Image (cartoon, rainbow, N blue to C red):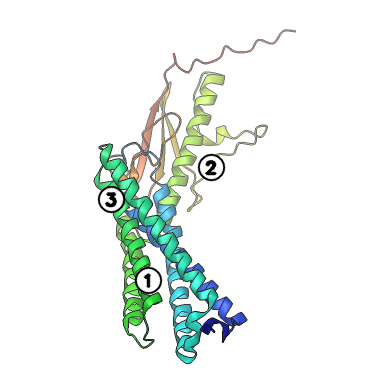
Amino acid sequence: MENSNLIRSTPKDVFLHLFNILTFYLSVIGFITLFIQYINAVFPDALNYYLTGIGDSVRVSSSIVLIAVPAYLLTAWLLSKDLALEPLKRDLKLRKWLVYFTLFVSAVTIIIDLITFVYNFLSGEITTRFFLKILVVLLIAVAVFGYYMWDLKRKELTSHIPKILSIILSVVMLVSVAAGFFIIGTPATQRNRRFDEQRVQNLQMLQDQVINQWTQKGVLPAQISLLNDTISGFVAPTDPKTKAAYEYRVVDQNAFEICANFETVNDSSQPLMQGQYYDTYNQNWNHKAEHTCFSRKIDPELYKPKAPTVNVQ
């Protein structure tokens, strides 16, 4: 009679094993996503004009790693403690199914990763960016496969290897998340950057309204408050942080400036910032962490004012 028939899974066993494997998968996905986004940031793709998504992905994956890894280590410790008291639980069908399923997923990931590498190599598309991504997935998949294969075959339950690996995993987790502060900035920097993104969006809205008034009336509004329209419901936006009105002034008949106070640097020459503030007019919204004004000159041939309406009595 097999050992698995001598002892049955309890609700506690089912909970711990399922929770352990779930947090493990979340941890692996979080690490892979985090490292891939770091690679995207350090080795940007010239064809990708929406790199601000990197910051969002890093925040999400960092959150997953910071929560899932400790939860996985905790449940792994509880399971290890339980197995030490009842060694026969190593032969539980639930445990073996989960372990073999994890081995299967790891093996498939390794095969697909290698196939992708060979295909792109034969296509002549091997770049540092691509190679590092393949390497990240391969190393993590091999590490997972190797650990669970060792855990499946080991006989002794007093090995110090799981404890050592737990310490290493904790250090890797902290270093990986901390690396994001140097690559995409601290949480405070990210918050300031989002404020600046909102400021640029507000300036774009103001610019659109100024151009609209130019085409409708043939003159630029003298002040920003004249852009308010009770019929359309447009209200001139203000600074999202200070609530102060944006600076606006007319330079000449068809030229104007709009200004704002920024807290971070946005420079299209910097990989992380490339295309960060893209808009339909493809205007230059580059700025430093200071008071910045953007000069706009309306082309009368491109934006022709409409003829005044004549009231017929």
* Mark whose residue sits in front, 2 or 1: 1
What amino acid is at disc 3? Val
Marks 2/1 in contact by CB < 8 Å: the verdict is no
Residue under label 1: 149
Quadrant for the C terminus, please: top right
Q: Give the mark, 3 or 1, whose residue is nearer the N terminus.
A: 3
| Residue 240 image offset from top left, x and y in percent | 50, 50
Residue 78, placed above or below residue 187: below
Give whichever of 68, 10 is nearer the camera. Answer: 10
| Residue 42's disc number | 3
Marks 2/3 in contact by CB < 8 Å: the verdict is no
Quadrant for the N terminus, please: bottom right
Residue 173, placed above or below residue 116: below
Residue 285, placed above or below residue 261: above
Can you see residue 142?
yes
User: For numbered disc 1, what is the local secondary structure?
Assistant: helix
* Mark whose residue sits in front, 3 or 1: 1
What amino acid is at disc 2? Pro
Residue under label 2: 237
What residue appears at the point 43 percent right and 69 percent down from the top-left corner?
A: 66
What residue appears at the point 44 percent right and 62 percent down from the top-left corner?
A: 104
Can you see residue 37?
no
What amino acid is at disc 1? Met
Q: CA distance from mark 2 to mark 1?
A: 60 Å
Q: How packed is label 2: few (under 14 Cα within 10 Å), some, or many (20 or more)? A: some
| Residue 177 image offset from top left, x and y in percent | 36, 65
Residue 183, placed above or below residue 281: below
